[in-house]
Structure formats: structure tokens, C-alpha cells
Amino acid sequence: QVQLVESGGGLVQAGGSLRLSCAASGRLFSSDSMGWYRQAPGKQRELVATKTGGGNTNYADSVKGRFTISRDNAKNTVALQMNSLKPEDTGVYYCNRHTIYGLDYWGQGTQVTVSS
């Protein structure tokens, strides 16, 4: 089992910044991927950014150049620095850990609201 606890999020004006953090505990492997997904009202959950255990990153086109994912394998944490936020970035952001066995674990979600 893996537990993910998120922090950060909140309300910010367009153009502002927020930082999300996620701490993992439980049965962890350094080769697991960690990342962030988001779900806007009435929409499906979508990938925002992921980082593999080897350091490879993947970003949604909509956030490239504005968001940065970072990971600390020693502390089992992942963070998402979000700059130049737009109203369309509004949603519930979920931390994800994808294990080498193909299992997905999710955090409880944290709300990000960007006002125009």
C-alpha cells in the first residue's frame, strides 16, 4: 500500500503562482513514477506532469513553460510549481504514484482556483 498526502493549492488571481507538494509513504520503489493530474468540473481527469524515477519528465502541452515538476527521491516527495496561472488551470489536483507493478495510487486531491 502507498499513501499520498498533498498540500498547497488555494485561490489565486490569474498570473499568480502556487506550489503543490505531495509526500508518499508505504511500500515505495525509487523506480516508481510520481506526478500530478487535475480534474476540472464536468471534465475527465487529465495528466498535468509526471516524473519517472530516472528523472524523465512529461508535461501536458497546456502547462509547458509555466509548470515545473520536481521530485526528491530521498524524501519521497513530489512538487509542482505553477506559475503564470490561468483560469483554465482551475480544478482539483491529484498526486499520483505509478508503481513498477502497474498500480496507481492517488492523493485525496487539492483544489486550485484561478480567478480572472
Image (spheres, grey):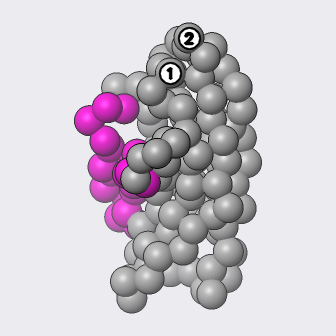
Q: Kindly indicate the quadrant of the structure image that contains residue 14.
A: top right
What's the CA distance linking mark 2 and mark 1? 6 Å
Magenta stretch: give its range: 45-63
User: Is 88 a magenta residue?
Assistant: no
Q: Which mark is residue 116?
A: 2
> Given the image, on which type of amino acid does mark 2 rest?
Ser
Mark 1 falls on what kind of element?
helix
In this picture, residue 96 sits left or right of residue 9: left
Q: Kindly indicate the quadrant of the structure image that contains residue 109.
A: bottom right
In this picture, residue 4 sits left or right of residue 63: right
Which residue was labeled with disc 1? Answer: 87
Residue 21 percent across, percent down from the top left: 65, 48
Residue that appears at 44% across and 83% down: 103
User: Is 56 a magenta residue?
Assistant: yes
Mark 2 falls on what kind of element?
loop
Residue 88 percent across, percent down from the top left: 45, 27
